[in-house]
Amino acid sequence: VVCQFGVMFFPDKLAALREARRVLKRGGELSFNVWDSTRRNPYVEIADGTVAGYFPANPPTFFQVPFGYHDQDTIRSTMQQAEFANIRLSEVALEGKSPTAMDAAVGLVEGCPLIVAIQERGVRHPRPIVEAVAKKLASAYGNSPMRCQLGAVWIAGAKAGHRQTPPLAHVAETFLFSYDPLQIGNSLASSRLASLDERWHQALLFGRIFIH
């Protein structure tokens, strides 16, 4: 079972991991990844801080969800409670690339559920916020292209039993890290979806599950 950047959104992570273990064959493996802290994803700190400056009394908290489940001791403990064996965790450093800082800003502000929180605070036209985020991103990482650090944590564990090398291990690794939020967020924001509900649904699809 492979889950790409989805476990952070599970309301009951222990129940989800137990269910993943239940469906595995003996010796089968669960492999998933999560975003590391905003410290290891500083572009998020820039976007989050810039947006928060427009709402000092009630800043949006969306980024706390996708970037809030990264403590390795906590993750290991949950895997142990779910009765996984041979638990491994590893930090992964990646590079994100966007054609321009504006493209990245559009994705970060309008291409995820953050835009819902912004509109709930009475902002109908978020363009000034997007431009402010783009300006700070360009200052930190360049404008065209924009390149920045991405940090993630890879986790794997097995269901006790006769161990076999997963036949699609190389596919799983490629799948887990084929996601660049700077690219996908902008594509979503540019897709002109019919409603915010539909956009939210599409955003949730970013956390994908693959079962073999």
Image (tube, rainbow, N blue to C red):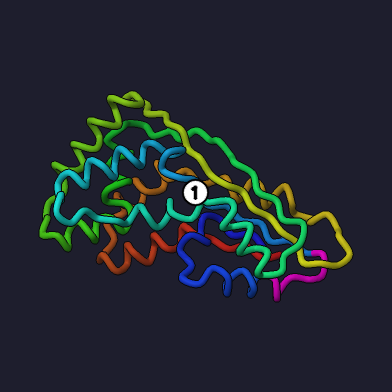
Tag 1's secondary structure? strand
As drawn, the residue found furthest toward the right would be 162
Label 1 amino acid? Trp
User: In the rendered structure, which segment of residues is drawn in magenta?
Assistant: 21-27
Q: Residue at x 57, y 74 (%)?
A: 15
Q: Nearer the viewer, residue 112 or 74?
A: 74
Image check: 184 left or right of 162?
Answer: left
Q: Nearer the viewer, residue 191 or 36?
A: 36
Which residue occupies 55% across, 35% down? 93
Inspect the magenta stretch and tell me whether residue 109 lies in it: no
The location of residue 30, given as percent across then percent down, is 68, 61
**In the drawing, does residue 88 fall left or right of residue 207?**
right
Q: Quadrant of the C terminus?
A: bottom right
Residue under circle 1?
A: 35
Q: From the viewer's perspective, is residue 137 above or below residue 122? A: above
Q: Position of residue 118 (x, y in %)?
A: 19, 56
Quadrant containing the N terminus in the rendered view? bottom right
Residue 84 relative to residue 117: left or right: right
**x%, y% of residue 10?**
48, 67
